[in-house]
Amino acid sequence: MMLSRSLTALAVAASLLLSACGGGDAPRGALLQSTPAGSLSAAQIDAATQSSGLQALSGAAQCAVSALQVRYVTRDPHGDEAEASAGVLVPTGTAAACTGSRPVVLYAHGTSVDRNKNMANLGDPEVQLVLAMFAAQGYIVVAPNYLGYAGSSLSWHPYLNAEAQAVDMIDGLRAARRALQAAGGAQPTGPLFVTGYSQGGHVAMATHRALQRDHAGEFTVAASGPMAGPYNLAEFGRRINEDLVINAGAVLFTPLLLTSYQRSYGDLYTSPAQAYNALYAATIESLLPSTSSIDTLVMQGRLPNDPTFTAKLFQNDTHPDGLILDSYRQDYVNNANNGFRRAMARNTLLGWTPTRPVAMCTGSQDPVVPASINQFAMRDDLNSRLPASLQAISFDLEDRDTLPAGSVGDALYAGFQNAKTQSDNVAAEYHGTLVPPFCMALIRGFFQQVQMAGL
């Protein structure tokens, strides 16, 4: 594959920047390297979206897309220098939508247990969705891989650490801007939009908050569109530990959370054996994310054999091989100073007041991130303080009245209901497969409205 002139120039500029950085403390967002990671023509994108049925939501591609992987300097939760990477999806072509000053989507990806997760990988299903919905329509997409993934210097991932993940996102945006400015072509000088899905919904909300609070002189957020995020972690944790209403996938999410918060704050336990079943305690802190498949980890006995990763969250008489000790669960419920409980409260996102438009999207039957205690609670909290002109929008794919008026909303509602009828396993596919394309279409429409209104 031959490199375009702009990508060739970028590779040269990046190598010079890498040499210039040298040793010592590099500034946040310093660009260390930028590497071309492939490209797709508009015809190739259209062939893929037609084959998958996505084109009814994405529309035909207006632009070809080139992918870059940028490596940059950021800070870990302790403020120490660390390296991370991001995927950058750049619209290319001669059409007006594909060149010059372009709007930027800062995208936060969903939970992954794969340490090699890379948002510059054009074969990744999440990348393909974001590419079709945004980059092929003329948006520059900056999608950090997060600390702990894709060759990051950090050996663990600060999962759902609101402040640390916002730092990582902002530094990835800085590095991407530097790379694109060096390359020419489409430039990240248009409006800035922030969005993300699932874990990325939480990250997007936290990033909007941090940009507004700490970086208003550097960045101006046009709007944000968090999707299906666990914004209300305090109530989420209470529901699981006290009410024993356990979300699908909790056996995977919980060790990611415990490791993240223990290594960030240091007060969740004195040793893993205080929280975990002895079957897993010896290896659990370094287990996820992993370069091994989850099936392999289960076969090795390092995770419970649990088809939905739900029932065996807690050890009990029915599940002696459960992951978390019931004594630790009880301490979470009864001890207000339990470190895990305090970390969940610390990373709850209710209570801030955006000054730019916010729209959220979910499906209210979501078994992974329950909408009632997350999106709907976040909506009510925001709108209790926001003026009528800036009320947060809450799209629910199960509620026609929350969707846009007219034929667009009718089509989205009908399309989502039809997608469920075509699914072989709605519960398994709901959060990760069925909801994302419809929510992304709604959020893109919201961003377009903000642009057209000049807000």
Image (cartoon, rainbow, N blue to C red):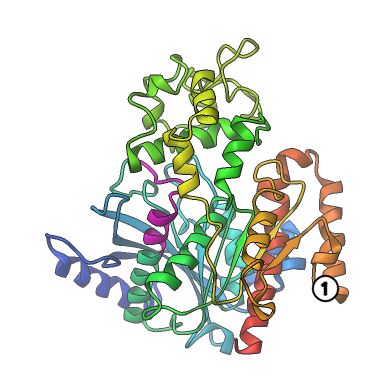
Q: Tell me the residue at 30%/46% (across/down).
A: 154
Foreground of the two, 136 or 105: 105
Rendered view: 26 above or below 284: below
Looking at the image, can residue 46 be seen? Answer: no
Q: Tell me, yes or no, whether the highlighted magenta stretch contains residue 153.
A: no
Q: Tell me, yes or no, whether the highlighted magenta stretch contains residue 162.
A: yes
Looking at the image, can residue 218 be seen? Answer: yes
Could you tell whether 108 is left or right of 417 in the image? left
Could you tell whether 455 is left or right of 5 in the image? right
Q: Residues within 10 Å of mark 1 (few under 14, many from 20)?
A: few
Farthest residue, direction left: 23
Q: Tell me the residue at 38%/24% (across/down).
A: 272
User: Which residues fall within the magenta stretch?
Assistant: 156-169
Image quadrant of residue 12? Answer: bottom left
Rendered view: 183 above or below 309: below
Which quadrant of the figure contains the N terminus?
bottom left
Rendered view: 384 above or below 349: below
Residue holding disc 1: 408
Q: Position of residue 431 (x, y in %)?
A: 68, 47
